[in-house]
Structures are given as structure tokens and as C-alpha cells.
């Protein structure tokens, strides 16, 4: 048991030291920028915002929420009535798929016109 504990501490320390020496330490201006949205932080804050970019961000959040809602499904299969769980999961997937198809047909996902 002590040998196992010493080996794990030794390997952890080696990996920690390697992780400090391995990366290149040459940050550029993009990495030093406090913003990650792609806007110039020194420019005016009143620039027009792309609604297409906003729509793609909302769709990403929607499908991310779908993953969070469907994540407990494998554990819910073990309940006394798994058919009801599968039905509600299917309803969520069908609604999101229909909404995605509607957005696609309307051309809202077209990045360039």
C-alpha cells in the first residue's frame, strides 16, 4: 500500500514538473487580451453586433441544454417505468430536431448570403 502511494505521488510530481516546462512561454497579443469574443477591446463599445452570430450562439446553448436534459436518461432506464422516460426523451429530441430543420429551411443558419 505504501509503495502504491509513493508511486502515485512520484508520478504526479513528475507530470506536474513536465507540465511547467513543456509549454512554450511566448504569449502573443491575442492571448494577453482580456476579451475572448473576437472584438477589439480598445475599440468603441457601440459597434453593431451580428445577429447571425447571436443566433448561432443561442442554438449552441439550446443544444447544450439538450445534452444536460438527456444526460440522466441512461440512469432513468432503471426506474420502474422506463417507457415513460424514453417517451419524454424522444419528445425533447423530436422538438429540437423540428426546430433545427425549421431554422435551416428559413435560411437562418446561412452564414453568407
Image: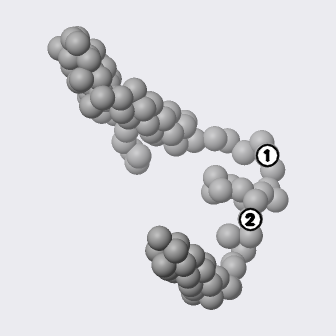
Residue appearing at x 69%, y 79% in the figure: 27
Q: Is residue 28 above or below residue 112?
A: below
Give the position of the C terminus as an image quadrant: top left
The residue that mark 2 highlights is 33
Residue appearing at x 26%, y 17% in the figure: 79
In the rendering, at what x and y percent does residue 33 appear?
A: 74, 65
In the rendering, at what x and y percent does residue 80 appear?
A: 23, 12
In the rendering, at what x and y percent does residue 7 appear?
A: 50, 79
Q: How is the image coloured?
A: one colour
Residue appearing at x 30%, y 29% in the figure: 75
The residue that mark 1 highlights is 45
Q: Is residue 66 visible?
A: no
Query: Helix, strand or loop at disc 1?
Result: loop
**Which residue occupies the foreground of this view, 83 or 37?**
83
Nearer the N terminus, badge 1 or badge 2? 2
**Which residue occupies the foreground of this view, 41 or 10?**
10
Amino acid at each position: 500500500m505504501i509503495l502504491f502511494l509513493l508511486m502515485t505521488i512520484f508520478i504526479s510530481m513528475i507530470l506536474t514538473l513536465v507540465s511547467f516546462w513543456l509549454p512554450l512561454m511566448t504569449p502573443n497579443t491575442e492571448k494577453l487580451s482580456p476579451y475572448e469574443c473576437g472584438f477589439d477591446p480598445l475599440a468603441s463599445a457601440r459597434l453593431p453586433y451580428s445577429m447571425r452570430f447571436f443566433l448561432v450562439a443561442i442554438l449552441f446553448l439550446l443544444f447544450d441544454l439538450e445534452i444536460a436534459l438527456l444526460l440522466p436518461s441512461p440512469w432513468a432506464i432503471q426506474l420502474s417505468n422506463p417507457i415513460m422516460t424514453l417517451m419524454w426523451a424522444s419528445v425533447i429530441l423530436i422538438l429540437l430536431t423540428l426546430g433545427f430543420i425549421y431554422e435551416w429551411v428559413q435560411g437562418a443558419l446561412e452564414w453568407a448570403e
